Amino acid sequence: MGQENPFAKRVVLIVEDDPLLRMTAVDVVEDAGLDAIEASDADEAMGILESRNDISVLFTDIDMPGSMNGVELAHWARSSAMPIGIVLTSGHHKLGDDALPVESVFFPKPYDFDTVVHMLKSIPILDASH
């Protein structure tokens, strides 16, 4: 348990309320050979995460409408013991390690797509027991 299938494609859940930014992120992720699933807010993302077990990485914006922001969504995902990598991004906030969930990464916007893709491909996926 906790081992990844090296032949399985990494699935990235992109959570972004701005449709243009979300489409761009989906295109970048798919062009890098990863699978992308999209959500426009945390509530939609939670439903996807609860209904699928193939999500490898949660890539979420911080500022979004709805019942919670991206930081709260990331903490919810981590506390639910989902074995996923977490990447947060924002053009308005700079988060320190103390605000981030365990084993997560923050990128300020605008971000370098090559750097983000490299991180999405290499971020360790936690064992479900963490």
Image (tube, rainbow, N blue to C red):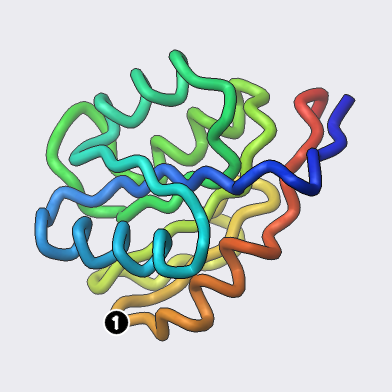
Q: Position of residue 122 (x, y in %)?
A: 70, 64
Looking at the image, residue 113 sits to the left or right of residue 97; the answer is: left
Q: Is residue 47 above or below residue 76?
A: above
Left or right of 52, for residue 48: left
Q: Residue at x 11, y 63 (%)?
A: 20
Element carrying mark 1: loop
Residue drawn at (67%, 47%), measured in percent from left and top?
102
| Direction from residue 63 to residue 72 in the image, left or right | right
The quarter in which the C terminus is drawn is top right
Q: Quadrant of residue 72?
A: top left
Question: Measured from the top left, where is residue 46 in percent x and y?
Answer: 37, 24
Dividing the picture into quadrants, the one containing residue 31 is bottom left
Q: Which residue is more in the foreground, 130 or 10? A: 10
Instruction: Please give the residue where the numbered disc 1 appears in the rendered image.
Output: 110
Front position in the image: 117 or 5: 5
Residue at coordinates 63% horizontally, 27% vertically from top-left? Answer: 82
> Image check: 98 left or right of 88?
right
Number of marks: 1
Few, some or many residues within 10 Å of mark 1 (<14, 14–19, 20+)? few
The relative height of residue 40 versus residue 119 in the rendered view (above or below) is above
Q: Amino acid at mark 1?
A: Pro
Q: Between residue 88 and residue 6, name the one nearer to us.
A: 6
Which quadrant would the N terminus be assigned to in this image? Answer: top right
- Residue 53 position within the rendered picture, expressed as x and y whole percent measured from the top left: 58, 22
Which residue is rendered at x = 42% and y = 62% of the image?
29
**Percent x, y for residue 48?**
38, 24
